Amino acid sequence: MHSTVETSPTWNCPARNLFCLCMLRYAVCDTRPLMFRKQDLPGILLGLGNTPDEVAATLTSCGIQGVRNTIRHLNPIVRYVERQLHVDDFQLCIEQGNGYSEMKLRLGLPDGKREKAVLPEPVRDFLDEFNSGQFKELELPPDNP
Amino acid sequence: MNYAAELTRILTGLGDTSDAVAATLKATSIKGVRNTVRFLNPIVRYCQAHLRLDNYALDVIEPNTLRIVLPSDAKVRVPLPPPVSRFLHAFHRGDFPDLELPRP
């Protein structure tokens, strides 16, 4: 007489075992890479607000300031997006495009890929007003950048 | 602009101990992600917030060194002050969870 160990058929299922292994790995260490998703950029820009004043209020609440007539790190919209993106290596730049309504935010990734998002109208209008000095409280002080 | 002097000024202003560095970051609402070397690194983020320069790239790829790459491709390296280096090691180890950005 020999003893047998009864095992559940599902326990021996390779797919289930693989699933459990994956879940255990996920539980021990969340190793999801910090990826950029194409939909991130328009979503972040739309989240700034529906009017130039709302955009300014969002920047104020985040403690974001900038410098007039800049298009990269010192631009307040670029600074806001830099804070929102969960990506370690990228380049952001405001592009004028073909006219005012074509103003875009361009993102360059290290693999050479480029994404562009048209600036929503409230953001364009905000930048226009910011660059002409209408949001002085959002300007970086010259002596304390 | 003397980039090395400006970066050194910013870095030394962070504090004299790793806890002081952490307190400065907290006071300025700067958070980061462990084991990152560019935009998500808390020290890089702090320097970006304080540099008055529109076009550049910053990283801490090299050990205990902050590097700025300029549009001309010129590179300037400054050593991280010891308290900042100690803070970064501790941050990467997970000693400052309150300074970690939540995952999206």
Image (cartoon, rainbow, N blue to C red):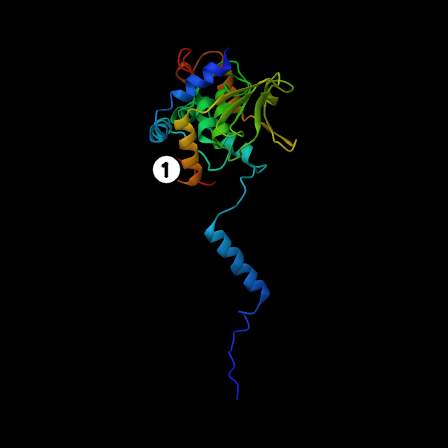
In which quadrant of the rendered image does the C terminus of chain A lie? top left
Q: Nearer the viewer, residue B7 or A23?
A: B7
The answer to which image quadrant residue A42 occupies is: top right
Chain ID of residue with mark 1: B
Looking at the rendering, which quadrant does residue B26 occupy?
top left
Q: Position of residue A21 (x, y in %)?
A: 53, 58
Query: For this view, does A50 lie left or right of residue A101?
Result: left
Q: Residue furthest bottom?
A: A1
Q: Nearer the viewer, residue B17 or A108?
A: B17
The residue lying at 45 percent from left, 23 percent from top is B47
Q: How many marks?
A: 1
SS for callout 1 = helix
Residue type pointed to by label 1: Asp
Is residue A143 shown above or below B29? above
Q: Is residue A44 visible?
A: yes
Estimate the x, y position of residue A118 in percent, counting from the top left.
59, 27
Q: Work out whether residue A66 can be spotted.
A: no
Q: Which residue is mark 1?
A: B98
Q: Is residue A123 left or right of residue B97?
A: right
